[in-house]
């Protein structure tokens, strides 16, 4: 039974362009993989059962991903799954979606299913809007509800990520999202600091802790912003030393970590 990474992501910007007839929102965002990751232990079994261990509900995204793949392929195999969390829940880092994507990637190999990336991308949206990005496995421009992905070359970078101790409901925040405030950017190329996060004001108004920590980070890094629908905040740096220096100044009661930007998902080459 081996451990596998489920890396986090940052939305370097997030524009909410319009509300669609289906209730979702038309978005434009740049998605960046980071090396901070959950870890998942997965072993294939012969009995056809999907078993999960960990301090999480049994109907979590890891289990749902395994069951969806099993149903899609009609395999008779099962799996034992264990999750070790390092990405904050409800933080906008895509932790649950990344966990689900890693389960799909690993079980596709462990169960000898032979699905290619295109087929995994077809089933991934059934688990959540961010899951296709982690299957895609490269930094990308995301459009539509985030499912239309175009590979994007991003320069090497380091990030200081702050994790306010609140869990933000994506559904709640999008229900209050203002549309049409920002216009779509012409990309590529993409430069650090372009755009903004249109959900930031909504989250800051409802979660004072997010607002206060964002103000602290911006006082040191003016281009700091929120990722996804929150609550995590980040600032980008050219070197690890710069990120570590600001991290060392965190006041008592604030927590965060330094992460390196990745070019590709660690399991990118597991599918063709």
Image: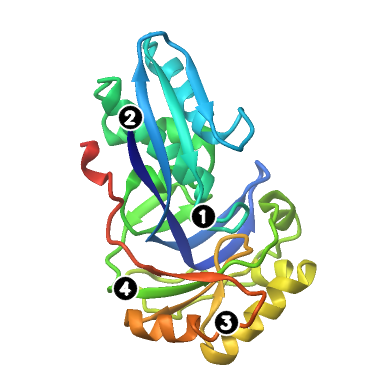
Ranked by sequence position, the earlier of labels 4 and 3 is: 4
Q: Nearer the viewer, mark 4 or mark 2?
A: 2
Label 4: which residue?
Answer: 189
Q: Are marks 1 and 2 in contact (CB under 8 Å)?
A: no
Query: Please, what secondary structure does the residue beneath circle 4 have?
Result: loop
> Relative to residue 250, is residue 80 drawn left or right?
left
Q: Are marks 4 and 3 in contact (CB under 8 Å)?
A: no
Label 3: which residue?
Answer: 250
Label 1: which residue?
Answer: 87
| In the image, residue 166 above or below residue 123 | below
- Crowding near the residue tagged with mark 3, few <14, some 14–19, many ≥20 C-alpha atoms within 10 Å: some
Ranked by sequence position, the earlier of labels 4 and 2 is: 2
> Split into 4 quadrants, where in the image is the N terminus?
top left
> Relative to residue 10, is residue 75 drawn left or right?
left
Q: Are marks 4 and 2 in contact (CB under 8 Å)?
A: no
Q: Are marks 3 and 2 in contact (CB under 8 Å)?
A: no
| In the image, residue 100 above or below residue 73 | below
| In the image, residue 81 above or below residue 180 | above
Question: Residue 76 versus residue 81: which sits nearer the camera?
Answer: 81
Query: Please, what secondary structure does the residue beneath circle 2 have?
Result: loop
Q: Nearer the viewer, mark 4 or mark 1?
A: 1
Locate residue 252: give its quadrant.
bottom right
Q: CA distance from mark 4 to mark 1?
A: 29 Å
Ranked by sequence position, the earlier of labels 4 and 1 is: 1
């Amino acid at each position: 039974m081996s451990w596998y990474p489920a890396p986090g992501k940052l939305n370097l910007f997030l524009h909410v362009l319009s509300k669609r007839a289906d209730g979702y929102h038309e978005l434009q965002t740049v998605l960046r993989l980071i090396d901070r990751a959950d870890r998942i232990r997965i072993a294939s079994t012969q009995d056809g059962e999907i078993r999960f261990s960990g301090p999480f509900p049994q109907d979590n995204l890891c289990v749902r991903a395994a069951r969806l793949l099993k149903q899609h392929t009609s395999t008779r195999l099962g799996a034992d799954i264990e999750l070790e969390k390092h990405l904050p829940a409800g933080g906008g880092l895509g932790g649950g979606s990344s966990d689900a994507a890693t389960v799909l990637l690993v079980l596709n190999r462990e169960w000898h299913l032979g699905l290619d990336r295109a087929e995994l991308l077809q089933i991934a949206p059934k688990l959540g809007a961010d899951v296709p990005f982690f299957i895609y496995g490269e930094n990308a421009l995301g459009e539509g509800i985030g499912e239309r992905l175009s590979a994007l070359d991003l320069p090497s970078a380091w990030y200081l990520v702050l994790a306010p101790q609140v869990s933000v409901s994506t559904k709640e925040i999008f229900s209050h999202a203002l549309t049409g405030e920002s216009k779509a950017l012409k990309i590529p190329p993409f430069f650090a600091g372009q755009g903004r996060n249109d959900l930031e004001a909504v989250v800051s108004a409802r979660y004072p802790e997010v607002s206060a920590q964002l103000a602290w980070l911006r006082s040191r890094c003016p281009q700091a912003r929120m990722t996804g629908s929150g609550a995590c905040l980040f600032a980008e740096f050219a070197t690890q030393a710069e990120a570590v220096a600001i991290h060392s100044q965190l006041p008592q009661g604030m927590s965060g970590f330094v992460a390196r930007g990745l070019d590709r998902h660690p399991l990118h080459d597991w599918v063709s």
